[in-house]
Image (cartoon, rainbow, N blue to C red):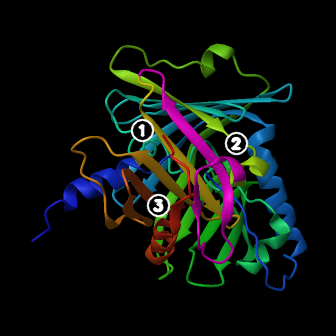
Amino acid sequence: MKQAGYSSRRVRVAILICLSLLYACAATAAEKPIEAEAKAWLDKMASAARNYSYDGVYIYLQGNQIQTVRIIHSAEKGRERERMVLLNGVQREVLRNNGKITYIIPKNSSPVMERQRVHSRPGFPPISPERIDKLATCYDILLNGQDRVAGRNAQRLVIKPKDKLRYGYRLWLDIETGLLLKTVLLNKQQNLSEQFMFTSLRFLDSVPSASLEPEIKGNKFVFFKNSREEKDRMQTTNSWHSTELPYGFELSTHRRYSSTADSQSYMEQFVYSDGLSSISVFIEPLKPKQEPLRGASSLGVVNAFGTTHGRFQIIALGEVPPATVQQVATSIQQRTGTDSD
């Protein structure tokens, strides 16, 4: 018999799966270079999503959950704009204007719990490598032949973790542009646990401005907008920090989201990354009579761990093993003499 609260916990974890961001590998151990051709493909992939304009539809399969998302991306005159629209279920949209992100979600939803519906990370692509020269401390990266995805020729890469703190990936990159067309995430048993794949994709010379404006209107929805700190300010301006991160992970992004309808409703997100895998930590004030999430939960390969710190709910989640998210969640502390509110 399922334990009481199991279903609601699973629902909360399912909703939490879209903010989460895509980042960086740092390590202090001896480094060896990634094989030159594989590195060149990762470099090409990292820049492709930012430098091309395109309109496509992709599916995101996680456990028994399937989401269909339309993405419209504009890269013109040094400015990036992006609109992601969830095509199944209740309407939701994510808008991005360079580093500014706006989530349009159902009214009265928790700013933490609703962030993850459109995708497990905010924005596209779901994986975006950084500091590629250092990835070899965490992963083995290999070329693996060619294939076709959404009618386009693709180069395959296999990425194998070197420890039990993270999972492996298979990537399909567009041969012409380097854009990520498909990913498969493998759990520790090397079984397929998550898949992202374009089903249609068009590259564009330009994107009409109207295509990047939201279609959702009405008083049943609310806009949550973020403010993002530059990396050199994150360590000194935020009131939360981790006391013990897993090997290879470091703070990559800090965002604070606030509601345009309720100034008291806000949420903070901290993203810790090893260059490919990322862990998002969400912190929000507990509402009166709100039942906090405590302990471990999972949906497919996404693992979450909830705890509390005073009157704040803390939830860490990511496409990493359960022990990794638990270590991060339990290491989050509030800096002495600060109050997030």
Residue closest to the eye, 340 or 135: 340
Mark 1: amino acid: Pro
- On screen, residue 48 above or below 320: above
Dot 2 or dot 1: first in sequence order is 1
Residue under label 3: 316
At horizontal 86% and vertical 25% (from top left) the residue drawn is 77
Q: Position of residue 234 (x, y in %)?
A: 70, 50
- On screen, residue 322 above or below 189: above
Residue 247 colored magenta? yes
Bounds of the magenta segment: 236-261
Name the mark nearer the viewer: 2 or 1.
Answer: 2
Residue 8 in view in this figure: yes
User: Which element is circle 2 on?
Assistant: loop
Q: CA distance from mark 2 to mark 1?
A: 19 Å
Q: Position of residue 63 (x, y in %)?
A: 37, 61
Dot 2 or dot 3: first in sequence order is 2
Dot 1 or dot 3: first in sequence order is 1
Left/right placement of residue 39 relative to residue 68 reads right
Q: CA distance from mark 2 to mark 3?
A: 20 Å
Q: Which mark is residue 111?
A: 1
At horizontal 80% and vertical 25% (from top left) the residue drawn is 205
Q: CA distance from mark 1 to mark 3?
A: 15 Å
For label 1, the crowd category at 10 Å Cα-Cα, with few meaning under 14, some 14 to 19 and many 20 or more, is: many
Left/right placement of residue 217 relative to residue 271 reads left
User: Which element is circle 1 on?
Assistant: loop
Toward the front, the furthest residue is 337
Mark 3: amino acid: Ala
User: Which element is circle 3 on?
Assistant: strand
